[in-house]
Amino acid sequence: MLESFLIPTAVVALAEIGDKTQLLALILAARFRKPWPIIAGIVAATLAN
């Protein structure tokens, strides 16, 4: 029963990710376990744009 809830929830969550940049940021934050430098880089790039 729980599996029938978790799989669609995960699929919808992945589908809601807007673009490749957000997916890359998510992967980098998970891989390096230091999300703050990644978030700071995203904010700096957004402000520079």
Image (spheres, rainbow, N blue to C red):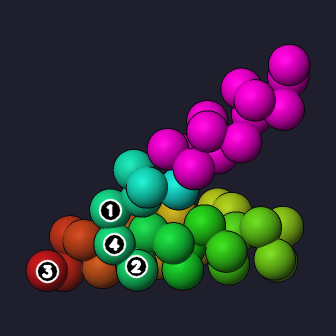
Asked whether residue 10 is in view, the answer is yes
Q: Magenta residues, as a range?
A: 1-13
Q: CA distance from mark 1 to mark 3?
A: 18 Å
Quarter of the figure that contains the C terminus:
bottom left
Crowding at mark 1 (Cα within 10 Å: few <14, some 14-19, many 20+):
few
Q: Are marks 4 and 1 in contact (CB under 8 Å)?
A: yes
Where is residue 22? Give x, y as percent: 44, 69
What amino acid is found at the position of numbered circle 1 in the picture?
Gly
Q: Which residue is painted at 49% across and 44% down in the image? A: 12
- The 10 Å Cα crowd at callout 3, few under 14, some 14 to 19, many 20 or more, is few
Kind of residue at disc 2: Thr
5 with respect to 37 (left or right): right
Would you say residue 9 sits in the magenta stretch? Answer: yes
The mark lying in front, picked from 2 and 1, is: 1
Q: Are marks 2 and 3 in contact (CB under 8 Å)?
A: no
Task: Compare residues 1 and 18 and report the one nearer the observer.
Answer: 1
**Sequence-first tag of 2 and 3:** 2
User: Which residue: 84% across, 32% down?
Assistant: 3
Judging depth in this view, the residue of 44 and 5 nearest the camera is: 5
- SS category of the residue bearing label 4: loop
Quarter-of-image position of residue 24: bottom right
Q: Residue furthest top?
A: 1
- 11 over 21 or under it: above or below: above
Identify residue for label 4: 19
Left or right of 36: which side holds 47?
A: left
Cβ atoms under marks 4 and 2 closer than 8 Å: yes
Q: Nearer the viewer, residue 44 or 19?
A: 19
Q: Are marks 2 and 1 in contact (CB under 8 Å)?
A: yes
Q: Mark 3 or mark 4, which is nearer the start of the sequence?
A: 4
**What residue is pinned by disc 1?**
18
Q: Is residue 41 above or below residue 3?
A: below
Q: Quadrant of the N terminus?
A: top right
